[in-house]
Image (tube, rainbow, N blue to C red):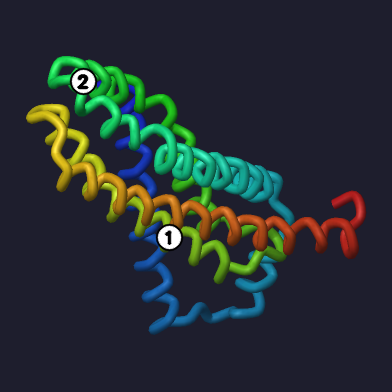
Amino acid sequence: MSPSFLVFLFMLAAFLLLTLAAAVRWVWHFFRPPRSAVASVAKLGEPSIVADGLLLIGVATAWYGVAGGWIAQFTIYPIYADFAPLGREAFHAFSRGYLSRIGIPLLPIGVMCLAWALLLWLPSRRVPQRAVSAVVILCVAFVAITPFAAIAQEKMFAHGFSESLYSRLMWSNGIRSVIFTAIGLLSLTAIRSRWTTRSNHEPGA
């Protein structure tokens, strides 16, 4: 397992822990609301360069994920089927080459998940928390569906091409691509809220 892939897994673990902690905090506040709700709202409205930076990173990496998901669906993963008739050795060489290099391209996806999870803790001014929460939930869905594709690739790497495993890889990545697309659209909604507020109501903010 490459160091870059280990970093990716570490980022996903950090994302899940941040998300779980945010969910626990939400449940706690739901049953025990803070004494000063007004102060809490005011705090959420304070400007934050860090939060705005996280928002920009979240949007950029979200659309990286959209592009990567559909490129894999229509270009990269079909090559598995193209290599299958060439024999086990050629197929294994392609699988080994792909899996040994996938770690670095996955890093922006880990950054995306982390950025949106951090926005639960450092809200960006005027960005609806509902949109941020929806993106985080979709990121969790991405993490949940990814093992189906990863296990299919691992088994084909070990045992050769399989129609059933290839089908699993394609439908699971298709779901991931749809998830990435939804994240991308929601990210545009989030940054539009921040951008229009910044330009119309807070010049120079």
Task: Look at mark 1 in the image and give the residue it sits on.
Answer: 138
In this rendered view, identify the residue nearer to me: 125 or 130: 130
In the image, farthest residue toward the left? 159
Q: Which mark is residue 86?
A: 2
In this rendered view, identify the residue nearer to me: 55 or 24: 55
Instruction: Name the residue type under label 2.
Output: Leu
Instruction: Name the residue type under label 1.
Output: Leu
Relative image position of residue 110 (x, y in whole percent): 42, 40
In the image, farthest residue toward the bottom? 31
The image quarter in which residue 56 lies: top right
Of marks 2 and 1, the one in the foreground: 2
Picture layout, residue 38 above or below residue 98 = below
What residue is at 41 percent from the left and 55 percent from the top? 139
Relative image position of residue 118 (x, y in whole percent): 50, 51
* Kind of element beneath mark 2: helix
Picture layout, residue 181 above or below residue 162 = below
Earlier in the chain: of badge 2 and badge 1, it is 2
In this rendered view, identify the residue nearer to me: 165 or 188: 165
Relative image position of residue 154 (x, y in whole percent): 17, 34
In this rendered view, identify the residue nearer to me: 114 or 67: 67
Dividing the image into 4 quarters, which one contains the N terminus? top left
What residue is at 61 percent from the left and 72 percent from the top? 40
C-alpha gap between disc 2 and disc 1: 38 Å
Picture layout, residue 98 above or below residue 145 = above
